[in-house]
Amino acid sequence: MMLRHGLIAGAAACLALVVAAAIISGGGAAASAATASAVVAVPFALSGLALWWASGLSAYAPPLVMLFAYLVLVLVGAMLMASVEAPGWLRPHWLMAAAAVAVGAWLSGMATGLRRARMPIYDVAVPDGDSERT
């Protein structure tokens, strides 16, 4: 449910921003907005799929999987930033605007899906096996 809500919100935001960029600044801006939206969508979709997979395991799995997914995302992002040069056709202002809008849309969509799913992600009930100690 979280993945579906995030995907719908992200796709709607991407479409709106690509159309706005095309109208305001032309094809290069629209391509920049679409590129940024795709770059944001891939890690969000992969982490949503990982969370969906982990939700079928133990109650401790989803938080650990999400922490691992964020760690991998940050490390891969840092490596890409250090090693890849931006193509000349990208427009930085549209790229950053689209990335910010896409992240906001994905987060709000996933938060809405989380609220509707009522899935305990970070509120894990720990069994009280030590209550007999005195």
Image: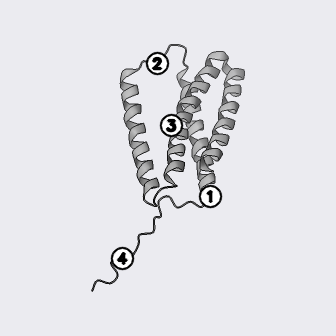
Return the x and y of residue 68 as percentages of the image width and height.
40, 45
Q: How far apart are marks 1 and 3 (CA)?
A: 21 Å
Q: How many C-alpha atoms fall within 10 Å of the one at disc 1: few (<14), some, or many (≥20)? A: few
Could you tell me which secondary element the residue under label 3 belongs to? helix
For label 2, the residue is: 86
Residue at image coords 55%, 26%:
95
Report x, y in % for residue 46.
Answer: 52, 39
Q: Is there a contact, CB below 8 Å, between mark 4 and mark 3?
A: no
Question: Which residue is under mark 3?
Answer: 43
Q: What residue type is labelled 3?
A: Pro
In which quadrant of the rendered image does the C terminus lie? bottom left
Q: Tell me where residue 13 appears, x and y as whole percent.
A: 66, 36
- Viewer-nearest of discs 2 and 1: 1
Tag 4 secondary structure: loop
Say which mark, if any, is on residue 91. Answer: none
Query: Which amino acid, by three-letter code, is at mark 1?
Result: Ala
- For the residue labelled by badge 1, is the local secondary structure a helix, a strand or a loop? helix
Q: Do the residues labelled 3 and 2 touch (CB within 8 Å)?
A: no
Outermost residue on the left side: it is: 134
The outermost residue toward the bottom is 134
Q: Mark 1 points at which residue?
A: 117
Tell me which corner region of the image, top left, top right, bottom left or bottom right, holds residue 29.
top right
Cα separation between marks 2 and 1: 39 Å
Q: Which residue is drawn at 49% across and 15% down?
A: 87
Q: Residue 129 carries which label?
A: 4
Q: Distance between the residues labelled 4 and 3?
A: 38 Å
